[in-house]
């Protein structure tokens, strides 16, 4: 599924640039993606759009950056891991994402139904949330989203 999502991000500048769903499925199949992966990816993107609308409608005043502290439920912490939580805190403190975008990222990470989402997958989720909202991270943050973390030191939570 993530290969399809990354392909869509790299191929289409904005979500609106994607062809209609039927043409997109044909195009993705022609590129070589499996039908099941295409279906999962497009379903995930549809749910992302719904989550974005739901959170934006429910919490319009919180679109501005807040100074509050997010306490993670055990299930969220288990799925995101220490690295993922640290990464989200870094992005929020750097004002790359706001509290609503953070919540959408968490919701979409939990929707993957994996026991733990890798940091690489979490970075793709963040990128797709920003992409779906027509936001583009600046160059340094873009590099951070695509950096190779094998040689990097772990990010601290404080």
Image (cartoon, rainbow, N blue to C red):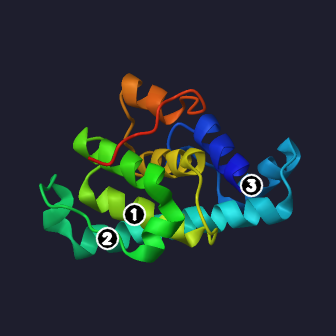
Q: Residue at x 26, y 73 (%)?
A: 57
**Front one among 107 and 129:** 107
The disc at residue 104 is 1
Helix, strand or loop at mark 1: helix
Mark 2 vs mark 3, foreground winner is: 2
**Front one among 153 and 60:** 153
Q: Are marks 1 and 3 in contact (CB under 8 Å)?
A: no
The image shows residue 145, relative to residue 5, as above or below, that is above
**Does 89 sit left or right of 62 as displayed?**
right
The disc at residue 23 is 3
The residue tagged 2 is 55
The disc at residue 121 is none
User: Of marks 1 and 3, which one's residue comes earlier in the chain?
Assistant: 3
**Does 41 sit left or right of 120 as displayed?**
right
Give the spatial CA distance, label 2 vs label 3: 29 Å
Q: Residue at x 40, y 46 (%)?
A: 87
Bin the neighbour count of mark 2 within 10 Å (Cα to Cα): few under 14, some 14-19, many 20 and up: some
Q: Residue at x 21, y 71 (%)?
A: 59
The image shows residue 15, relative to residue 62, as above or below, that is above
């Amino acid at each position: 599924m993530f290969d399809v999502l990354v392909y869509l991000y790299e191929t289409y500048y904005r979500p609106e640039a994607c062809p209609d769903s039927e043409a997109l499925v044909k195009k993705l199949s022609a590129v070589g993606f499996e039908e099941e992966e295409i279906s999962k990816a497009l379903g995930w993107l549809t749910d992302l759009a719904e989550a974005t609308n739901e959170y934006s409608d429910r919490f319009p005043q919180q679109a501005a950056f807040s100074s509050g502290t997010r306490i993670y439920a055990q299930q969220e912490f288990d799925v995101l891991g220490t690295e993922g939580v640290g990464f989200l805190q870094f992005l929020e403190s750097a004002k790359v994402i706001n509290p609503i975008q953070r919540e959408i990222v968490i919701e979409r990470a939990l929707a993957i139904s994996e026991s733990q989402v890798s940091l690489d997958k979490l970075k793709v989720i963040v990128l797709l949330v920003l992409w779906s909202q027509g936001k583009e991270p600046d160059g340094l943050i873009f590099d951070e989203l695509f950096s190779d973390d094998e040689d990097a030191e772990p990010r601290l939570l404080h």
